Image: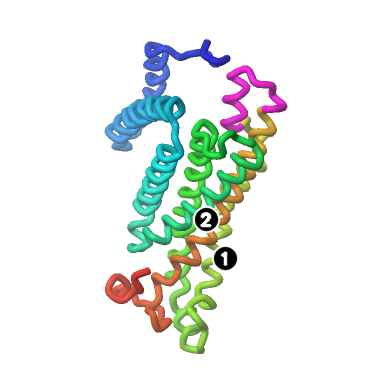
Amino acid sequence: MTGGVVDIGYPELLMAVALMGVDLVVSWRLRLGLVRSIAVSTARLLVQLLALGFVLGYLFRYQTVWWVALAVAVMSLAATQIACDRTRKTVRGVAPSVFVSIFVPSVSVALVVVDGVIGAQPWWNAQQLVPILGMVMGNALSSVSVAIERLFSSMDARSQEMYAMVALGATPREAAFPSIKAAVSAGMAPTLATMCAAGIVQIPGMMSGQILAGADPMIAAKYQVVVLLMVSAAGTAAIVCACYLAYRRRFTDEGYYLEPGLRDELSPRR
């Protein structure tokens, strides 16, 4: 036992890894061609999370405000890279918009929760700030990826309508607004669905972890409520920010909607 948590040994961890045999058998039997991807994903999961555990142990033990700031910066850049990789086929050049959209809402909401709700001392305490920021930022990058994909696919589907609206004097924002609404709605939907299912269909992750660690279920439930609400708030703010910063990539500086062949050459560098 470690602080109320049952320590999992490495032999037991390898036993859990063996569960991935289900995925491997399905891929092999159905000829999905995913055996290599499953193996690589499993190996990355082990290496990345064990390395994270080592780094966080060091950070919690020897934390300073500068080390915590560095951790936040690395997390933000990694989240931006992952989100941009997911949207690269949709549109290029959105990295600055994605970074701002993920960083500002995530850090703002995490600081409100750590300082105002939990009351961490000091407010930059890594043991509270880093895990909470990781949850918020992970959800924000997923929401932003979904929203940007939906935004530009909707704009492309409405291209003729948007040509007509711009020709009649509409601003780029007015022409893109229906697509922005659709993208924000699509980005919010997964989090809202999770909130509806929490406590009925599933016991969410943080609550399950605290219960396994021996915490009072009511205390664990309160923490989980805070987590879901902060994730929803940060995700929604990130989606709205991303959509309003990124939609201009489909327009010239003069406000004309771009044909597919002209987008990379003439779209504004924002």
Q: Quadrant of residue 113?
A: top right
In the image shown, does 263 or 119 lie closer to the viewer? 119
Tell me which residue sits at (46%, 49%) in the image: 141
Tell me which residue sits at (54%, 61%) in the image: 240
Residue underneath mark 1: 181
Tell me which residue sits at (40%, 46%) in the image: 73
* CB atoms of marks 1 and 2 within 8 Å: no
Residue underneath mark 2: 238
Residue 29 can be seen in this image: no
- Above or below, 248 relative to 231: below
Q: For numbered disc 2, what is the local secondary structure?
A: helix
What kind of residue is marked 2?
Answer: Ala
Magenta span includes 180:
no
Quadrant containing the C terminus is: bottom left
Give the image location of residue 244, x and y in percent: 50, 67
- Above or below, 68 relative to 99: above
Q: Residues within 10 Å of mark 2 (few under 14, many from 20)?
A: many
Which is closer to the viewer, label 1 or label 2?
2
Give the image location of residue 179, x and y in percent: 52, 68
Q: Quadrant of residue 62?
A: top left
* Horizontal arrangement in the rendering, residue 24 relative to residue 185 (left or right): left
What kind of residue is marked 1?
Answer: Lys
Which residues are the magenta region?
Answer: 204-219
Q: Residues within 10 Å of mark 1 (few under 14, many from 20)?
A: some
- Closer to the chain start, of discs 1 and 2, is 1
* Horizontal arrangement in the rendering, residue 63 relative to residue 212 (left or right): left
